Image: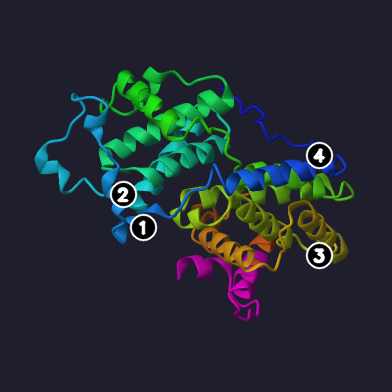
Amino acid sequence: MFQLELNEFGALQPGQVCSDDLKEKIWIMKEKESTVYECRDYLSRRRLGGAELHDNEINERSFDESVHQDESDVASDHEVDITCRKTMCEWCYRIVDHFGGDRELVAVAMNYLDRVLDKFHCDRKAYKLVVITSLYLAIKIINRRALPMDALAELSKGEFETHHISDMESFILTTLSWQLYPPTSSTYITCFQNTIPLTLTASVRRSILEKAYFYAELSVIEYSFITFKQSEIAFAAFLNAVSAVNSTLLPPMERQSIIKTIEDLSGMQHDDTSIISARRKILSEYQNSEQFQLHDDTITSEDTIQTIKNIHELKGDSYDGSLSPVCISSS
């Protein structure tokens, strides 16, 4: 097993007083996500025919002549799209889960992927190689204990060999200018956890964090979140998690205190248009997720009903309590 180690941004331990140091770390991350770790909506730009995308193209022949496709396969297996990204992201989660790694590694890997694709166009086979190598890099750089390259080559089912991954690794490092520690939404949530009062029960504190991290993971899978900053996604996920807690367990005054503290730390406001939009998208993705539809043991019926209510409220709809999770998920 490998465990995620603290990256360069770090965070205080739960329960510590929110300090100037924590505020400074959050603002450093915000500056980084808007500069060296920024990624634009490259798929939309490609659909609009951005000229720069045709000048910078990577394919399997960029790394080794032995990695190739038949010409008959190119037309049907060329274009990279949202579905392709989602499929590979889910594959990354399965790999990380299988080897017992921290799931935040996938968010880091997808940051590498998106930033490479923001600069270079590629076909699907090269895309797979970028994904595999990005995950390999994330594990090696962030975790500091690499998953063997030959193990990932084996998981590609013979499509790639270790020297393909090695060549792509050098290419990615150069393309990203060795900027390899992106702030993820989970990194922010780790900072925000210090705003949860220790007066709350351990189960409530744990529930808030588990939901927030889960909501953040949903955003990693969906390409449409690429237009949001990681800080915005984190705040939206945290707000959704906090608002799902029953008022008898988290009184309104304490709820507002949490929100106000995060606003003071981050400079974001809960009623910013971007935050509200991110909250809507997260809840919409959650409503369509397998976990929501299965109603597993980590989500109580009361929490699920509250989440449905939040979805309707953020969409501007009224909610009379008559809809059940079953009729929502089966509609």
How many other residues sit within 10 Å of disc 4, few (<14), some (14-19) or many (≥20)?
Answer: few
- The answer to whether residue 80 is above or below residue 102 is below
Give the Cα distance between marks 1 and 3.
Answer: 44 Å
Residue 92 left/right relative to 107? left
Measured as percent of width and height from the top left, residue 165 is found at: 35, 24
- Write down the residue under mark 1: 45
Mark 1 / mark 3, whichever is N-terminal: 1
Q: Nearer the viewer, mark 1 or mark 3?
A: 1
Q: Secondary structure at mark 4?
A: helix
* Numbered range of the magenta stretch: 306-331
- The answer to whether residue 218 is above or below residue 37 is below
Identify the amino acid type marked 3.
Answer: Ser
- Write down the residue under mark 3: 247
Q: Can you name the residue that lies furthest to the left here? A: 72
- Write down the residue under mark 4: 21
Identity of the residue drawn at 52% across and 27% down: 139
Mark 4 / mark 2, whichever is N-terminal: 4
Give the Cα distance between marks 1 and 2.
Answer: 8 Å
Measured as percent of width and height from the top left, residue 291 is found at: 54, 52
Give the Cα distance between marks 3 and 4.
Answer: 31 Å
- Write down the residue under mark 2: 53
Q: Quadrant of the N terminus?
A: top right
**Label 2–label 3 contact, CB within 8 A:** no
Q: Can you name the residue that lies furthest to the right here? A: 199
Mark 1 / mark 4, whichever is N-terminal: 4
Mark 2 / mark 3, whichever is N-terminal: 2
